[in-house]
């Protein structure tokens, strides 16, 4: 109000020559000040969220608000994760809605935090909790130098399990009952023995309230490999995750890495009856859920959770429902003087571009979308002007059914076992005594690996 009053007084003192020009400027200033972001009511945690049998991995630049809305339309039960939000971003940027707000239909949802300072993480988590997230996850697995290099968090935190425990305890103490979880790798650089992984899990779970770990079953190379290479070159060791389940039967463990279909998800959930006494609690799928969301998620409610039906019967229905959300979101955060709206139509269309992955005329549709984005003012308009490029049978076909479930599951179990041919590692001798090794034993073990 103070700045507006100053402007009004300044405008009142101009002469008749400049009055019309300044009047136009005043209208622009007042128009911008009136474009206040709409109220974004915060949500509340789910009273009884579904079991985390399947989740979509947090992916920087990919699992944003808009992709999550599409994923939620495809499955009402799949757990969604935000992109990693760095603690300092929340602390120093007062516009929390842009990073943390989500519509209530996106439950169940977890917010992934990045950081390594317990006090800062606790401060950030207190803000996150006000938005009603069902879970807060600490990133201990990202190999990107955008994360591991600056601030020493992400996968590099696995080298400091005591710090991770302190961080998780601080986060838990700052929130009102919101579960705290950890996403990690099975090792980092040369610290890649099962004993080191066992110690990490035991330290964090015994010194903090964390009871759920999402484990990418590859080690991370902080130097020498890109994030893409870190997702493909280090070998998968699924058996280590089942060994952890044997050694920590009271913990929930979700398996991440190399699993890209619902059939493989079911295989992973059933694997304990084949090769280990107890199974993982869930499976996390990464880029497959973004690159091919329809085939990955559209049948998840029926296939994974045993629902009677899925939410929508066709891609067309999903797109129509998403367009309602998207058109309402255009310009929600800001409208610049040049008319650019944030989020823009282009940003809101982005998650849809993979809905016709490998479908007939899918590439032609994406090209058509790119052509109309220059002039379209809404997502509905983009769809109205481009969907006729696609065959009606593609638009209206139902969610894909599982492929010969039992045979496929058997094949997938063989495939998953092939990725990790070594036997399940034994429990470390010091762990059998149900006590953590002392500092001398730690140094000896680290020296041996």
Image (cartoon, grey):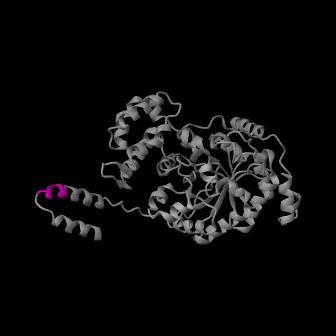
Q: Position of residue 283 (x, y in %)?
A: 66, 49
Q: Residue furthest left?
A: 16
* Residue located at (45% from left, 60% from top): 97
Q: Is residue 300 visible?
A: yes
Relative to 60, say whether 383 is above or below.
Answer: above
Look at the image and say whether residue 295 sits in the magenta stretch: no
Image-based side of 374 in relation to 194, left or right: left
Q: Is residue 44 visible?
A: no
* Residue located at (70% from left, 67% from top): 208
Residue 442 or 367: which is nearer the viewer?
442
Question: Which part of the image, by quadrant, shows the N terminus?
Answer: bottom left
Look at the image and say whether residue 22 sits in the magenta stretch: yes
Image quarter of residue 289: top right
Image-based side of 51 in relation to 9, left or right: right
Q: Which residues are magenta?
A: 17-23
Image quarter of residue 447: bottom right
Q: Position of residue 304 (x, y in %)?
A: 62, 47
Q: Position of residue 302 (x, y in %)?
A: 58, 45
Residue 249 or 14: which is nearer the viewer?
14
Q: State the predominant SS element of the stretch in magenta.
A: helix
* Residue located at (40% from left, 42% from top): 346
């Amino acid at each position: 109000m103070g700045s507006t009053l100053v402007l009004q007084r300044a405008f009142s003192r101009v002469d008749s020559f400049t009055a019309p020009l300044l009047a136009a400027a005043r209208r622009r200033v007042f128009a911008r000040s009136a474009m206040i972001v709409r109220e974004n009511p915060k949500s509340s945690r789910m009273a009884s969220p579904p079991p985390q049998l399947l989740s979509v991995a947090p992916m920087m630049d990919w699992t944003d608000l808009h992709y999550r809305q599409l994923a939620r339309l495809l499955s009402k039960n799949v757990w969604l994760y935000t992109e990693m939000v760095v603690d300092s971003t929340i602390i120093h940027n007062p516009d929390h809605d842009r990073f943390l707000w989500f519509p209530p239909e996106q439950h169940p949802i977890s917010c992934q935090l990045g950081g390594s300072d317990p006090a800062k993480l606790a401060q950030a988590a207190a803000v996150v909790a006000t938005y009603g997230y069902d879970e807060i996850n600490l990133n201990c697995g990202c190999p990107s130098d955008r994360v591991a290099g600056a601030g020493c968090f992400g996968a590099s935190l696995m080298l400091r399990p005591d710090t991770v425990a302190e961080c998780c305890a601080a986060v838990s103490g700052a929130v009102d009952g919101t579960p705290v979880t950890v996403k990690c790798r099975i090792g980092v650089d040369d610290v890649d023995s099962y004993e080191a992984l066992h110690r990490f899990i035991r330290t964090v779970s015994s010194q903090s309230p964390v009871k759920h770990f999402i484990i990418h079953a590859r080690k991370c190379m902080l130097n020498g490999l890109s994030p893409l290479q870190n997702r493909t070159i280090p070998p998968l060791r699924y058996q280590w995750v089942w060994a952890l389940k044997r050694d920590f039967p009271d913990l929930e463990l979700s398996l991440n890495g190399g699993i890209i279909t619902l059939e493989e998800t079911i295989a992973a959930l059933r694997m304990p009856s084949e090769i280990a006494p107890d199974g993982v609690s869930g499976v996390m799928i990464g880029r497959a859920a973004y690159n091919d969301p329809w085939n990955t998620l559209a049948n998840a409610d029926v296939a994974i959770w045993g629902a009677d039906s899925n939410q929508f019967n066709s891609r067309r229905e999903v797109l129509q429902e998403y367009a309602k959300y998207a058109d309402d979101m255009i310009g929600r955060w800001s409208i610049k003087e040049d008319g650019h709206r944030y989020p823009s139509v282009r940003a809101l269309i982005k998650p849809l571009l993979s809905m016709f992955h490998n479908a007939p005329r899918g590439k032609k549709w994406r090209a058509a979308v790119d052509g109309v984005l220059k002039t379209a003012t809404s997502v509905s308009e983009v769809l109205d002007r481009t969907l006729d490029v696609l065959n009606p049978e593609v638009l209206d076909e139902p969610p894909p059914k599982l492929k010969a479930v039992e045979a496929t599951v058997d094949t997938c179990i063989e495939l998953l076992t092939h990725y990790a041919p070594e036997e399940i590692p034994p429990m470390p001798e010091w762990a059998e005594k149900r006590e953590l090794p002392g500092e001398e034993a730690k140094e000896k073990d680290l020296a041996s690996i």
